[in-house]
Image (cartoon, rainbow, N blue to C red):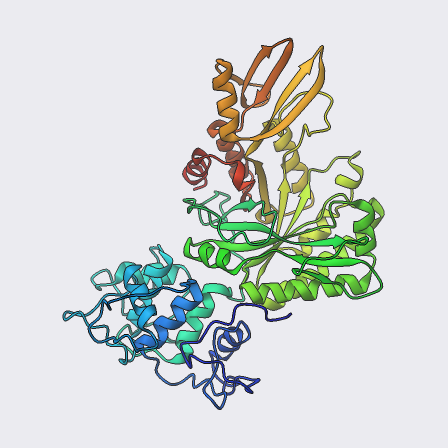
């Protein structure tokens, strides 16, 4: 199942050649690794002898086909008339070119011609990429590009996104015809990150929008193809795609794969390539979440102590990284036996060896340290985890959980600050991502006892307060807006997550020079959440 990714036709040779099992001519070429990555993903193939021909020029029609098929799924679209006079209906790229014109990715020349057989220039590639992905950016250091250049903004956007690189003399040479190797590199960079250390915030400790602004997307089933409209300022999304499952008789789904060894553990993959493409168009990095065995301490223990199962799981994660072109992995293993603390650290170490080899980010979720936290807190060796992970995500919420016997905030500011300070004793500030809640709990109590509590998102919480006809007041103790009312002898209480609490949490992240913030979860947010984060995380 290693390469189950949809076999995109390549722009280099738009047919995958039967019998060719390797891509030749990549060994000593600077773009060879990029080409091999695309080859393994099913995006690129060689000619009928399996040659990559990376030094050859690439035509406009060929590059456009590569881009469209890598970024979009155009399906069965028919065009009665071509937008371009020089593209007949019989041309293999007829549909692709017309689709790209409708999307605003390409335009004709002064005579409306597409010129499909012309070698594509480097600047033309930039224009197509920026339009297709809606890239933005202001940074470019190319010696031959200044603000007077016609496509200065587009070059800045592509350079800021890391898609284009200059020559050794720091020039870009926009009018040069692009080679197949250069095209492979630019397309591969859409999906495969550069092998470098992950970006951190400024050394001064001031959080910036260039730091981590992550949201978790709670994906519960296969086939979810979208994360919704673009969230301004968001730069990392973490869909809950992978997990370990234990089976006891039921039949695994076709997206669940048996782990090696004498066990009943399976690796579940509910990822989606269309989702990945959309995320890239939005400008997000994707750190897919990999979670534990149904948060069962017993099942987690069985998996962690089975070396074959661990190695098999890591092998599957590796496959998924390449399959989807992931930028990172977020490990979310919770509720583990305290005696499994060291073996979990070993698992993190093994995962980090794989992620470092692939040049992607590894982040690991931990809870607030609680001396009586047992399987939910004492299971983490935070100091050791920080030695292997690029980031440690501190889940600073659920102070009052669904099982709490008293009503309260999911994470008041004093509690949150103490969580940060305790974590800082073991984890460097530049590695800590502060987890913030987009959810709250609506509490119902009678005679001082909790009779019901519900986790609700920001918009529903606001609606509940409005329907009750009460006005929230600022609670100095928690640093949050608070509302309460009574219905039929039941007392309702809610500590709101809103612009006030989100700003205060970001202020804490900036105060301690943390790497950024991570929100649980995207589905609980209202539009004000993204605006508040963007305005304050800078």
Q: Locate residue 4, reporting x and y percent.
A: 59, 68
Pick the front one: 245 or 480: 245
Does the rendering let one see residue 377?
no
Pick the front one: 356 or 182: 182
Q: Is residue 528 left or right of residue 155?
A: right
Q: Locate residue 199, reporting x and y percent.
A: 51, 55
Pick the front one: 75 or 467: 75
In the picture, the quarter occupied by the N terminus is bottom right
In the picture, the quarter occupied by the C terminus is top left
Q: Is residue 496 left or right of residue 420?
A: left
Above or below 260: residue 511:
above
How many numbered marks are there? 0
Q: Locate residue 436, reporting x and y percent.
A: 57, 37
In which quarter of the view is residue 87 placed? bottom left
Does the rendering let one see residue 92?
yes
Above or below 46: residue 360:
above
The structure residue drawn at horizontal position 56% and vertical position 84%, both measured from the top left corner, is: 22
Q: Locate residue 83, reporting x and y percent.
A: 23, 67
The structure residue drawn at horizontal position 65% and vertical position 62%, both measured from the top left corner, is: 317
Q: Is residue 379 left or right of residue 233?
A: right
Above or below 280: residue 481:
above
């Amino acid at each position: 199942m290693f390469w189950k990714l949809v076999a995109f036709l390549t722009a280099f040779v738009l047919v995958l050649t039967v019998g060719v099992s390797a891509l030749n001519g990549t060994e000593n070429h600077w773009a060879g690794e990029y080409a091999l990555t695309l080859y393994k993903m099913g995006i690129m193939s060689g000619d009928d002898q399996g040659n990559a021909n990376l030094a050859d020029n690439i035509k406009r029609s060929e590059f456009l086909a590569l881009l469209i098929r890598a970024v979009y799924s155009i399906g069965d679209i028919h065009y009665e008339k071509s937008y371009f006079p020089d593209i007949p209906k019989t041309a293999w790229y007829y549909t692709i070119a017309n689709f790209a014109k409708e999307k605003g990715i390409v335009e004709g020349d002064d005579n409306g011609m597409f010129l499909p057989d012309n070698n594509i220039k480097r600047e033309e590639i930039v224009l197509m990429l920026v339009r297709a992905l809606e890239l933005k950016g202001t940074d470019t250091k190319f010696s031959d590009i200044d603000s007077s250049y016609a496509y200065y903004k587009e070059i800045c956007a592509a350079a800021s996104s890391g898609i284009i690189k200059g020559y050794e003399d720091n020039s870009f040479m926009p009018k040069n015809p692009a080679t197949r190797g250069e095209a492979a590199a630019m397309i591969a960079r859409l999906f495969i990150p550069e092998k470098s250390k992950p970006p951190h915030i400024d050394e001064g400790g001031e959080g910036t929008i260039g730091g981590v602004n992550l949201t978790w997307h709670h994906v519960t089933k296969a086939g979810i193809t979208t994360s919704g409209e673009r969230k301004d300022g968001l730069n990392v999304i973490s869909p809950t795609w992978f997990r370990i499952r234990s089976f006891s008789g039921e039949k695994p789904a076709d997206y669940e794969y048996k782990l090696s060894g004498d066990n009943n553990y399976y690796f579940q993959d509910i990822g989606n390539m269309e989702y990945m493409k959309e995320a890239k168009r939005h400008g997000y990095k994707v750190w897919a979440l990999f979670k534990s065995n149904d948060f069962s301490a017993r099942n987690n223990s069985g998996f962690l102590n089975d070396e074959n199962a661990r190695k098999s799981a890591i092998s599957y994660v590796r496959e998924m990284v390449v399959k989807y072109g992931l930028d990172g992995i977020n490990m979310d293993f919770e509720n583990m036996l305290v005696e499994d603390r060291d073996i979990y650290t070993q698992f993190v170490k093994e995962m980090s060896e794989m992620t470092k080899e692939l040049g992607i980010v590894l982040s690991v979720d931990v809870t607030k340290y609680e001396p009586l936290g047992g399987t939910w807190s004492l299971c983490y060796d935070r100091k050791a985890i920080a030695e292997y992970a690029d980031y440690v995500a501190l889940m600073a919420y659920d102070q009052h959980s669904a099982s709490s016997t008293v009503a309260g905030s999911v994470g008041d500011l004093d509690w949150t600050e103490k969580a940060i300070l305790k974590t800082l004793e073991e984890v460097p500030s530049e590695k800590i991502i502060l987890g913030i809640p987009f959810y709250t709990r609506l509490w119902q109590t009678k005679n001082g006892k909790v009779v019901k509590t519900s986790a609700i998102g920001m918009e529903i919480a606001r609606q509940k307060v409005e329907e009750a006809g009460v006005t929230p007041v600022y609670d100095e103790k928690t640093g949050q807006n608070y509302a309460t009312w009574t219905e039929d002898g039941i007392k309702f209480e809610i500590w709101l997550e809103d612009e006030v609490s989100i700003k205060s949490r970001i202020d804490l992240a900036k105060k301690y020079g943390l790497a950024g913030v991570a929100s649980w979860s995207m589905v609980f947010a209202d539009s004000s959440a993204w605006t508040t984060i963007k305005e304050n995380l800078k």
